[in-house]
Image (tube, rainbow, N blue to C red):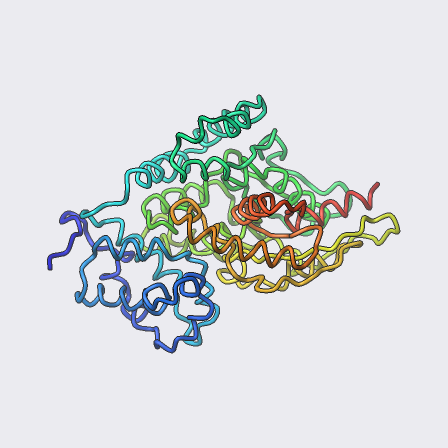
């Protein structure tokens, strides 16, 4: 059967057939990944497991299988949570395989994705997330609609019943845009008010993080200043490219990677700080993404060597615990792990260390904290049924902790958990660990 790949598409290192074969054949088919895979646990089907997907990838690399819609659908059904990568005794680089498979799948010309999916990808991946000005314009427009009450009124009106159920669900997932964006809250350069400068760091502000969670960026800068760091925050930053890379749009991912590298004075910085788990996992691999780019390959490797998750950085330089006061608010807190922070970056202990260091907080461990909540970038939109099933399980476990606060370090997880808890009638607060630490410092200062 002939391949359905466009004939004018040249192979490059991010195609399955051109990928280093040692990466493709590394899987031993031992099955230790199966219990950790959310989609396999939902269906108990081999094809929905990491082992099954790698078998499909290898068959394509060996010219035993053609790229068809079924392969694209299977790669779309994968969350890309990387739990399999943590469990794998052979250390298979599933992250690379997954992104290359999706990039290959995007070249399928027969039976393309449904129009709604193609429209969403073109609008978000191709336009908004490649142009900071457009994303901020959309954010300001949405903020005005939300502040005016029109958005809430529309949600409660009978008009929504005429929309397809998936569009109704998309509306309920819309993030609340904050009053100010990161450039309004942070100066391009800030220095500690007390004490000498110990480190000079760059702060990544993100895209959705910038619109809906700019306050977390402000909290991150405050915590860094508290630890003697000079903080540089370049203006109008671009998306990190994770949403492009995870969806196989490698050319767009490369484009924004170059722009981010250009924005930071790499040689002058001790670290580049990220506070979003999904972004951080991708940001650590610019070197691989731009390996064949003579103008950026060396700088991308330097970039990779300096990217640090905020929790990892704080513990590494010596976490400064807030002072214990009798007036510190008392709360039970549990912690949900962002997949790409836990499995992609192997950062698990440090967020808990921070939570335990905050006066008044009692950490209650969450069962299956490392299991995906079903957000996974755009997965909650493209695979709503699977996403909902994972969210229901997660909310059940959260409620069982009887915590007041669930801490998580990724905007996608935050949005997903907020929606799930609200629908369950729970008043449990969702907060970033770094924000809880910043609040403790502010309480300490009175």
> Foreground: 155 or 139?
155
On screen, 285 above or below 23? above
Q: Residue at x 87, y 48 (%)?
A: 327
Apparent side of residue 405 relative to residue 157 in the rendered image (left or right): right
Coordinates of residue 220 in the picture (x, y in percent): 64, 45
Q: Residue 112 appears in which quarter of the rendering?
A: top left
> Foreground: 30 or 248?
30
Of all residues shown, which one is farthest toward the left? Answer: 1
**Placement of the C terminus among the 4 image quadrants:** top right
Apparent side of residue 327 relative to residue 356 in the rendered image (left or right): right
Coordinates of residue 358 in the picture (x, y in percent): 76, 54
Apparent side of residue 156 relative to residue 123 in the rendered image (left or right): right
Apparent side of residue 119 relative to residue 142 in the rendered image (left or right): left
On screen, 136 above or below 93? above
> Foreground: 222 or 269?
222
On screen, 435 above or below 30? above
Of all residues shown, which one is farthest toward the right? Answer: 326
**Placement of the N terminus among the 4 image quadrants:** bottom left
Coordinates of residue 419 in the picture (x, y in percent): 56, 44
């Amino acid at each position: 059967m002939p391949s359905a790949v466009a004939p004018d598409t040249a192979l490059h290192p991010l195609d399955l057939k051109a990928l280093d074969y040692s990466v493709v054949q590394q899987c031993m088919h031992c099955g230790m990944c199966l219990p950790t895979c959310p989609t396999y646990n939902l269906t108990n089907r081999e094809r929905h497991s990491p082992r099954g997907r790698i078998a499909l990838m290898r068959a394509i690399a060996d010219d035993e299988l053609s790229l068809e819609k079924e392969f694209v659908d299977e790669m779309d059904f994968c969350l890309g949570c990387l739990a399999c990568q943590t469990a794998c005794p052979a250390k298979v680089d599933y992250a690379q395989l997954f992104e290359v498979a999706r990039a290959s799948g995007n070249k399928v010309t027969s039976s393309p994705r449904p129009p709604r999916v193609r429209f969403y990808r073109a609008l978000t991946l191709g336009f908004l997330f490649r142009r900071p000005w457009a994303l901020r314009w959309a954010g300001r427009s949405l903020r005005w609609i939300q502040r005016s009450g029109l958005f809430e009124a529309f949600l409660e009106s009978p008009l929504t019943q005429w929309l397809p159920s998936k569009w109704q669900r998309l509306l309920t997932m819309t993030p609340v845009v904050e009053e100010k964006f990161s450039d309004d809250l942070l100066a391009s350069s800030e220095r500690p008010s007390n004490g000498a400068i110990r480190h000079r760091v760059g702060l990544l502000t993100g895209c959705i993080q910038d619109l809906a969670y700019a306050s977390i960026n402000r909290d991150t800068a405050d915590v860094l200043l508290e630890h003697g760091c000079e903080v540089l925050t370049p203006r109008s930053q671009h998306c990190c490219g994770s949403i492009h890379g995870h969806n196989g749009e490698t050319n767009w991912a490369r484009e924004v990677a170059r722009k981010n590298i250009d924005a930071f004075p790499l040689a002058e910085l001790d670290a580049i700080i990220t506070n979003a788990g999904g972004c951080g996992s991708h940001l650590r691999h610019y070197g691989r993404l731009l390996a064949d780019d003579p103008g950026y390959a060396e700088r991308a490797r330097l970039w990779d060597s300096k990217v640090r998750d905020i929790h990892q950085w704080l513990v590494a330089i010596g976490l400064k615990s807030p002072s214990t006061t009798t007036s510190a608010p008392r709360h039970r807190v549990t912690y949900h792990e962002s997949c790409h922070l836990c499995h992609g970056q192997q950062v698990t202990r440090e967020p808990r260390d921070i939570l335990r260091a905050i006066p008044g907080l009692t950490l209650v461990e969450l069962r299956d904290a490392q299991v995906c909540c079903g957000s996974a970038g755009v997965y909650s939109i493209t695979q709503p049924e699977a996403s909902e099933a994972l969210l229901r399980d997660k909310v059940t476990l959260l409620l069982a902790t009887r915590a007041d606060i669930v801490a998580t370090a990724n905007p996608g997880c935050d949005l997903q958990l907020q929606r799930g808890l609200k629908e369950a009638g729970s008043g449990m607060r969702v907060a970033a660990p770094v924000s809880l630490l910043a609040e403790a410092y502010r309480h300490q200062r009175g």
